[in-house]
Image (cartoon, rainbow, N blue to C red):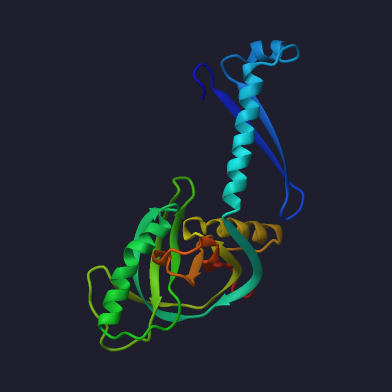
Amino acid sequence: KFSDSTYLYQWDITAITDSTSKVKVYVKDLDHSLKNKIEIPFFNTDFEKRTISTVREFNENLNEHIGKFRVKVIGKSELTSTYCAYVSVKTTQFGKAKGMMYNYPLLNTILAKNGIELNGRPFIEITQWDKETDSIEYDFCYPIIKSDSLPAHPDLKYKQFNSRNALKAIYNGNYITSDRAWYALMHYAEKNDIEFIDLPVEVFHNNPNMGDDALKWKAEIYLPLKNMDE
């Protein structure tokens, strides 16, 4: 929206290869549509200037964004079963990493203080995903060796995470945007007619509280399959 006009942008995106797409942008000034149709063939209008500037700015921002992460789809894989300690979090997709960072000290402190033996890398299991409201619920899990003397805490729970077949991708980048791998996996599944459950699992190789170059961070992203025989 500009000071005197509201522009409507319609994006027509056609995939050419797995990594390139052809994009057409159709733009309409909702307040001065007829005027622009008359003037554009004869004048260099503000509508043209604004449209070109906006599309260029969007393209620059998009290229900057996608340069900050990498996603590589591996294909079919399997998530192994494990017993785990976990905390449940409700947030947005963008707030996912913040919820992890907030709960890292809680899990680390309680488990370390009580001498609980870890049994793998921390992971999150998405339990609810509302794409319309951009809201998610997930369990932030630490795999542990089950014992008879697990510590009690009002925010800490325990469960058995069952094995399942899944599509796997490797993600490098800030965990704030690791959901980009969710969409890459869903696109791969749809393209290959693979039925899936849109409740991803992310296994983390790095502690985001430690900083460092985000492109060095690694996560394994899994998209569970509907049919365990897939």
**Residue 104, horizontal then vertical, whole percent:** 34, 68
Return the x and y of residue 214 as percentages of the image width and height: 51, 61
Q: Nearer the viewer, residue 164 or 68?
A: 68
Question: What residue lies at 36% left-to-right and 59% top-to-bottom?
Answer: 99
Identify which residue is drawn at 56% across, 15% down: 31
- Give the number of callouts: 0
Query: Vertical placement of 3 versus 87: above or below?
Result: above
Q: Is residue 10 left or right of residue 121?
A: right
Which residue is situated farthest in the bottom direction here? 148
- Kindly indicate the quadrant of the structure image that contains residue 62: top right
Position of 134 compared to 5: left or right?
left
Give the side of residue 225 with respect to residue 144, left or right: right
Question: As drawn, is 187 to the left or to the right of 201?
Answer: right
**Quadrant of the drawing holding the C terminus:** bottom right
One can see residue 197 in this view: no
Residue drawn at 58 percent across, 19 percent down: 30
Q: Looking at this rendering, what residue extends furthest in the front direction?
A: 212
Position of residue 205 relative to residue 43, above or below, is below
Which of these two is toward me, 123 or 70? 70
Percent from the top left, x then y, of residue 209? Answer: 39, 65
